[in-house]
Amino acid sequence: MDIQRSELLRGVSSDFVKQIRAITVKESYDTGDILFRKGDPAEYLYVLLMGRIKLSLGERKQVVHIVSRSGEAFGWSSLVGRKSYAGWAECETPATLQKIDSHKLLKILEKDPVSASAFYRQLAAMLGSRLLQSYSRYEKVFTGETLI
């Protein structure tokens, strides 16, 4: 898996993809590694290549999403004007990620409004999907269904 296959880059120009690849760093992590904590400066966007990442909120670290699909992105706070991450990201398994400096990415986005529009549409779709998954989980809790 390469960053260019990430759902975030659907519909962007090939030049845009090349620029993103130039600022992307591939990193590996072990089970239990914390990628960021609530309140840490939001400086990176991450794209999963392999593994499972647990995203959680609150002091009790309530799990809100598991990142498990190759190409799935997280750490989006860095792209929407948030100065810090709203939750935690922890490796559930050994993981390989693409790490993208958000300041550099934002500069690339500013230079290519057409690709930036496609990028943010994909980001919105990804977040919308996660929100719908959360609604489904909460509905099951409120109706007394067993969660898996």
Image (spheres, helix red, strand yellow):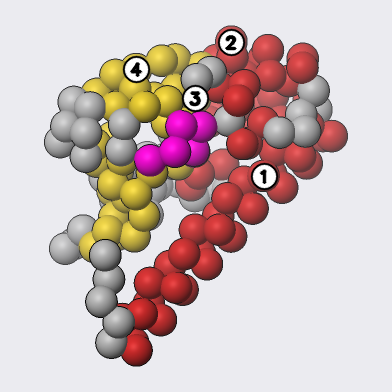
- Quadrant that contains the C terminus: bottom left
Going from N to C along the chain, the mark reached first, 2 or 4, is 2
Q: CA distance from mark 3 to mark 4?
A: 11 Å
Which residue is drawn at the image coordinates 77% and 15% (left, top)?
15
For marks 2 and 1, give the one nearer the viewer: 1
State the CA–CA distance, disc 2 to disc 3: 10 Å
On residue 27, the disc is 4
Residue 37 location (% of width, % of height): 26, 45
Q: Is residue 16 left or right of residue 24?
A: right
Determine which of the numbered discs, if any, sits on residue 45 in the image: none
Magenta span contains residue 69: yes
Circle 1 residues within 10 Å: few <14, some 14–19, many ≥20: some
Kindly state the secondary structure of the residue where label 1 is placed.
Answer: helix
Q: Is residue 134 above or below residue 19?
A: below
Circle nearer the N terminus (1, 3): 3
Q: CA distance from mark 2 to mark 1?
A: 21 Å
The amino acid beneath tag 3 is Ile
Which tag is nearer the camera, tag 1 or tag 3? 1
Q: Which residue is mark 2?
A: 22
- Segment tinted magenta in the rendering: 68-73
- Magenta: main secondary structure equals loop
**Which numbered circle lies on residue 100?**
3
The answer for how far apart the CA atoms under marks 2 and 4 are is 15 Å
Q: Earlier in the sequence, mark 4 or mark 1?
A: 4
Q: Is residue 91 above or below residue 19?
A: below
Residue 87, image x, y percentages: 32, 53
Q: Amino acid at mark 2?
A: Ala
- In terms of sequence position, does the residue under pointer 2 or pointer 3 come before the other? 2
> Residue at the location (67% across, 15% down)?
19
User: In the drawing, does residue 108 fall left or right of residue 142?
Assistant: right
Under tag 4, what secondary structure?
A: strand
Task: Find disc 1 in the rendering and name its residue.
Answer: 122
